[in-house]
Amino acid sequence: MKKLLLFLLSALLGSQVLCQEKYGHRITYEMVLNFDGHQVYGAELFVGQLDAMFLYKLNDTGFIAEVVQSEVGHDGAFSFDLVDTTQYFIVSDWVGKSIIHKEQIPGEQRFCLVEEQMPVVQWQMTGESRMIQGFSCDKATGSFAGRHYTVWFTDQLPVRFGPWKLHGLPGLILEAYDDDREVEFYAKTIAPYSGLDSKLDDFLIRSQMAGYSVMDRVEYNNKFKVYLDNLGRRMVTKFGRGFQVKVSSSDIKTIERNDL
Amino acid sequence: MIYKQLLWCWILILGVWVGAWGQVSVRGKVSIRETGEALQSVSVVARSLVGDGGIVGFAHSDENGFYVIDDLGADVFELRFSAMGYEVERHSFSGLSQDDRIIWDVTMAVTSKKMEAVIIEVQKPIVQRGDTVIFDAAAFAKGNERVLADLLEHIPGIRVDDQGAVWVGYQEIKKIMVEGEDFFGSNYQTLSTGMPAYPIEKVELLNRFTEHKLKQGLEESDQKALNIVLKSGYKVKWFGNATLGAEPVRAGKYEIAADLMDVEGKFKTYLNMDLNSLGKSRRASMVQLMDTESAVVSPFSAAETMFSADSGPQMQRGDRFVEGADRKLSKSLIFAPSAKLKLNLMLFYDDDRDDWQMELHELLNATDSVLIRKEGYFNRRHNRMGLTNLNMQFEPAEGHMFKSKTLGHLNSFQGYSVITSGEGDANWQASNKRHGYEQQFEYAWRVNADQFLQIDARIMESESPQWLVYGVRANSLHLKQDSVSQSGYYGLRFRGWNAHYLRNTTNGGQLELKIGSQRHHEVLKVDSAAENHQVDRDYFEVEHNRKWDRFSISGRLLGKHLYGELSSEEKGFDRWTLDAGLKSSIAFDDTHRLTGSYTYASSEPMLLDLHQSMLLAGYRSRRKGTAHYNHTSTSTWVINHQAGGWSSDFLVNTLFLAVLYHQQIGMDTWIYQDFSVSEKIWVKGSYYISIQSTMDYYLKPISSNLKLELSTNQSRLISALNGSDPGPSNLTSYRIGLDLKSGFNGVFNFHVGGHGNVAIFRGKSDTESRNYFGLCFVDFALNLNERIQSGINFEWCFSNIMDHYTGKPYLLDFNFRYLVIKNKLSFGAVGKNLLGASAFVESWEDERGILTSNYKFAGRMLLLSMNFRI
């Protein structure tokens, strides 16, 4: 059913794009994750008046989420970190107020498309401004998915979409970072681009042909939680007697801090 | 009834409040001018036309072209309509009343203008390029930084101690450069404590720093250094800052400091002047420029021990106990006439005097009696030091480099101590002078990408005449004529050369070979007795390491051949020693590492009497009574585990250290006129075991870091008194520390914590004693705005022996700064010891007895200062 919905959505997006997208832009970003180290991603944002596609890729190998750090504490607690490196694209549809996000199915080598409502970020203008490469930029702050972001945007480029899912501002975001400086986006280039319609169609149709399953955000988060629980159980059973193990998922660092 | 009345009042108040906050709203429709069709997704921005011109509201048009902006926070504003592919439309509004609801329709014309591609260069606060991490100074500056050290304190992972030494994690950096220029070498504290912060644009942390340029990319270095990048405007002119301060109540308390620098052109200069009477000594960093081989050896061990003792307990900041004055002038001049040749001339002068007081109370268990000693000390140390250092670097061709270092120094020291005891007063006065020079030449050749060769030669000579005067029942600072005096002399002549070869092997490893030879001639005189001896040392060292992806292993072999002769003995000596070590490391990932090593070291097994107060222990002579244990052979095990990183929420570091002393020679500290301890002890089988763990956890909800420190040490000691048999005694100590430090963005920050130490001593005769010491502290920083900043430091100490003394265990310091003109002028006040604590008491109980030290705090002080920038 959901695959069918996806197909319809894809068709709908395509028709709207054809009507509206005479003008668009391609913005490249440097996406930096300072979770445990300094990881730099190459990212691209394709924007039109009503749609956007955000692509990103680690500038290194390692696309598969993996346990990168584990330890046994004094109290027997076992904790581990996962690096969130699996997403390929985020398609945002303003008319439908929805987002399709390609994610890796937790614990599997397969991918899925996660549908979710487009978030409404309550942006607060701070009144501060500065110039970035000739663009007059205003500063705004807002919270999204457990992080509080500071962004610098310019209304000289009237784009309502931002990197990741930081949408809703009256101009293009050139710089964004959260309070912990764990997630950062820096615009690198801006260029006119009019091929968003075919790009959207291409990605969505290819996703459908690849047989990606579709789920909503709640379902995905539940799957993730189940995956972690199972992982913990597997670990517990490998230890000997008298060794109590508690598995904690609270240390997992992702861009979106959704409650698990 | 009363509740109803209250409810009505509340509704009334709410209504008035809501009414008072009524706002302007704008709504309308956007359509395409040419066709009249509704235009959706148009950005509509309302920007205030007064004040900062900030955005006061915004909206996007919907699929019917409608937009709404409610609650506009201004009554004079501009509406700006923009959409990709259309001309921008603007309209200004003014003279509106609070409840106006404006309807404003707009048509937008299609534009043929097309945007050109743009490359954005955004400055990021932290950038990593290879092994270098670059910090943007502006992103970390809070506006209250006066000198470089203040700025470095705000960069995550970097710490600066009281003396200006900079630490990255647990490792001290090697040097600080400015625009790539090394002004002061290892004396970089001159820069960290003096260089103004405001011209700094970036701080570059150089991981894997290599001292030698030609070794870059070849040497496996874990050293770190900083390079300071200046704002462009300060690269072409002189700049600096200055501070003037005075104590309004107590005369003679002052501070005058100035730093000036210029990095433009072929001549680059740094001038530093620091005159103060606050007990701030800057001499220690200068001494680091001199080779340790050239250290003065003094035959007057008792007096030297007295004058070299710490002015205060190690738990406390030294400047809290010292009343003194320091006058220091430094200059560094770099002249680079071409890209191939560079000269660096450093000049230093320091005149440093400090006074400090303490009381010593001892109950000593002598062989057949108990000695009770109670002494009061007034100590004065006066050091004067001049030093000049000229470095030359010449690169005739790529891969080849000549270096030379010429160093001359002149130093004088006067120490004066008044000892008050029940038997009357005694005065000790010691002085020495020292002058010498050092000349070094070096040639280095980067043979190819995988090979490096370096040959150096060094000559060094120094002379040090010394005097010691001892008088009983003296008055004031003048000795009586019947005082006993001694004179001494120490002379050193050193010649040596070294060769160093480094090569990357084909199997991913690295091979390092070193050979060298040194001639070491010493002359010692006490009164008329003179002694000459020469010790020659040849050595070779081989080190090989291999590194896989996450695992490394290295082995090291060091052979030393010592031979020479003493003037007092007919026969010479000729000995060989061999040291070996093995080290391995595994890195699970970037932030999780386990390292282990085993080392067997055999010091030169030689201990020869030179004369009454001197020993030849190994390579060179040493004073007796230096509390120094010369271990003839040791086995050392080290295991270190680290998880997490400085940028992560969690960091834990655990160190296990075990040292087994196969044989050792003890030279005891305590030498007095009425009793003495054994001066040489040969013992076997003592050991030292230590486990230390530090955990950091960043608590995001309160933006604070929680630190927990746990450690335990166990050691087997050797002691002997008045010739008694040496025997083992055990010392076990525990330490726990806990602190919480906030990192708020707002005006207020705190750091609160404490630590406690317990030491359990078990003597030869199964006697046991327990001492504990604890310290709690609370620091507050209150930075009201960019102009007003202040801080308070409070400490409370406790111990099981403090009740016997009247000294208050409470300490309170504060600082305040008011910025009058940004980047130009500020006033400040510094208060120290405001609660008037008089003394700090430390006690120690062991086989010898109970030793109690009562350190006198420097007096209460309030210093008012003015700082201006040039």
Image (spheres, rainbow, N blue to C red):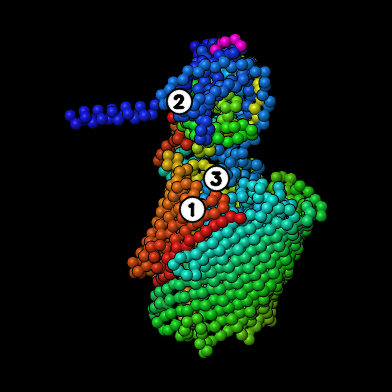
State whether residue B363 is above or below residue A4. Answer: below
Cβ–Cβ under 8 Å for marks 3 and 2: no
Question: Where's residue B152, x and y in %?
Answer: 56, 50
Q: Residue at x 65, y 81 (%)?
A: B531
Residue at x 42%, y 73% (from the top left corner) = B359
- What stretch of residues is rendered in magenta? B34-39
- Residue at the (49%, 57%) spot, across then down: B828
Circles 1 and 3 on the same subunit: yes
**Residue B145 percent across, percent down from the top left:** 54, 51
Looking at the image, residue B384 sits to the left or right of residue B309; the answer is right
Characterize the local packing of mark 3: few (<14), some (14-19) or many (20 or more) Cα atoms within 10 angstroms. some
Amino acid on which the number 2 mark rests in the picture: Leu
- Mark 3 lies on residue: B140
Tag 3 subunit: B
Q: Main secondary structure of the magenta part?
A: loop
Q: Nearer the viewer, residue A187 or A3?
A: A187
Which corner quadrant holds the C terminus of chain B?
A: bottom right
Measure the alpha-carbon separation of dots 1 and 3: 20 Å
Q: Earlier in the sequence, mark 2 or mark 1?
A: 2
Q: Is there a contact, CB below 8 Å, between mark 2 and mark 1?
A: no
Magenta-drawn stretch contains B37 = yes
SS at mark 2 in the image = loop
Category of crowding for the residue at label 2, using alpha-carbon neighbours closer than 10 angstroms: few (below 14), some (14–19), many (at least 20): some
Q: Amino acid at mark 1?
A: Tyr
